[in-house]
Amino acid sequence: MVLHTDATLLRLFGAVLGLLTLASGIGALLNHHVQDPALRATVQNVNARIRAWWIMAGVFIASISTGRAGSIVLFGLLSFLALREFVTLAPTAPADHRALVWCFFVATPLQYALIWAGRYEAFTILIPVYLSIFVAVRVALAGDTGRFLQRAATTQLALTICVYFVAYVPALMMLRIPGYHLPNAALIFFLVFVVQLSDVLQYIWGKTLGRRPIAPSVSPSKTWEGFCGGILSATAAGTAIWWITPFGPFQAALMALSIALMGFAGGLVMSAIKRDAGVKDYGSLIPGHGGVLDRIDSLCFAAPVFFHMTRYFFAS
Amino acid sequence: MIAQTIGGVCKFVAGVSTEWHCDPDTGDPRVFFANHASHLDFVVIWSALPTRCRDEVRPVAGGDYWNAGMVRRFMADRVFHALLIERHGAVGHSLAAARTSVGLMAAELDRQHSLIVFPEGTRSRGAAVGEFKAGLYHLSRLRPGVDLIPVFLGNTNRILPKGEALPVPMLSRVVFGAPTRVAADEDKASFLRRARAAVMELGGPHGSSH
């Protein structure tokens, strides 16, 4: 494995560590000064989230530093964990068992193997074409037709969101962009940085100024104030690091804006699924955040859009 | 070593979260009794126990099933040190055989080994918990000083249902409840009803919805 000791990437990683240090400092200050019992729980949750961010940032930086291999292993594992959480909540029936076994142990590794092999066409059609057909047929063959449409669609959507969409992140490594002088890991960094920062900023704007909920029946914590403040400030942050991308400043702004908007859309849809299942979080693997899917819900929708926009407008 | 490996794979596949409503390790032998729908059930309970307890806990399993074939016998004997008994309803079952089974279990408790039992007698299909067999009651009458720990297993029936060879990875739950014992004046039917309710209550209102 080749370690990308590219100076620009190292500076970016250093900046992330600086941000986290700042966040930990603010967390410690809040912990010291906020004594109102009604707010203590929020402060403790914020501190738990920041501690988890250190670990997540460390794992992310370590894996994209090794380039293609590390990012495929990391996001392959995240797909597996996300699918595990999704299927736990999904209203599947005993007859779907074999179809799901195929999804976990054949479709998921195959999707990432195709990205490893750099097979663009095969990786973009494997799940939407072949697995969609296969899942529908396999569920039909199992013989139980009760709620057939719902069950087949559930398994198809599970694969699409948790595997197909997430796999677009390491797929950025296969793009060939003329005149781009940085390793493609910087593109992954741009995407993940903007989408996660947008989540954090929406949370902060929402907690401080949030008044009017956007869709109270889906997610009471998503407000217009949090949405506007978060999306705009994340777009500004993305624009500020335009120099790590193949885009100009204005193009980087549009890319960051679309990433942030798609991230919001992903979070909203994944909240609707949780609401339907009657749970607050997908899991409890990441302290303060919930499950893996609670953390990458926004990335799921942003990744394919960012990949295809970059490929369409910039790749050779 | 094989048991550790299987326990590790089981954790990866079944993403177990554990809740304790009792002391995880009292140092005394105990009887864990749980609902049963999957081959994973014993491994999930076993790998949730404190390390020291794992070495001295023995699952009680049906001899007719686990003696059939070399692989099963190896797993039962060598890997998980199962206590194989003749099951209710098995061919040639008699009152004498049932007494022998309960006696064997009591003897294990005397050797300071804890037991894991599945009082439904076999794996049930789906999330429903079947009626409990009488063995747990007779064992508790024979060894009234031993704590009985109800254990609820959530979702293992969906991960590896009866009749399937490969698991679907999902999150699962194992909940250890407060210890109970058979009361001096309690009859068999009401004890078994109470024991079964204790397991199901640990699942909570949504515990058996999947």
Image: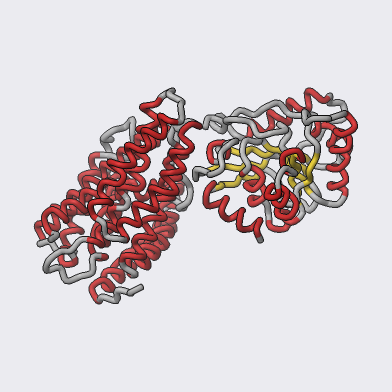
Asked whether, in this view, residue B116 is left or right of residue A286, the answer is right
- Decide if residue A78 is in sight here: yes
User: Which quadrant is home to the N terminus of chain A?
Assistant: bottom left
The residue located at (59%, 36%) in the rendering is B163
Q: Residue at x 28, y 41 (%)?
A: A129
Lateral position of residue B97 relative to residue B2, left or right: right
Q: Is A308 located above or below residue A94 in the figure?
A: below
**As drawn, B53 above or below B194:** below
* Residue A140 image offset from top left, x and y in percent: 40, 29
Left-right relation of B105 to A15:
right
Q: Nearer the viewer, residue B129 or A315?
A: A315
| Most foreground residue, A163 or B147 | A163
Q: Is residue A29 visible?
A: no
- In percent of width and height, residue A299 lies at 30, 50
Q: Which colour style is shown?
A: secondary structure
Question: Residue A123: percent from the left, percent from the top?
Answer: 28, 51
Report how many numbered discs are placed on residues in the image: 0
Residue shown at 36% from the left, 56% from the top = A75
Using the rendered view, name the quadrant where residue A52 is placed. bottom left
Residue in the picture at 33% in, 43% down:
A161
Q: Is residue B16 left or right of residue B141?
A: left
**In this orientation, which residue lies closer to the viewer: A169 or A40?**
A169
Q: Give coordinates of residue A4: x percent, y percent.
A: 29, 73
Examine the rendered structure and indicate whether residue B90 appears above or below residue B146: above
Is A35 in front, or is B123?
B123
Dividing the picture into quadrants, the one containing residue B143 is: top right
Q: Quadrant of the C terminus of chain A?
A: bottom left
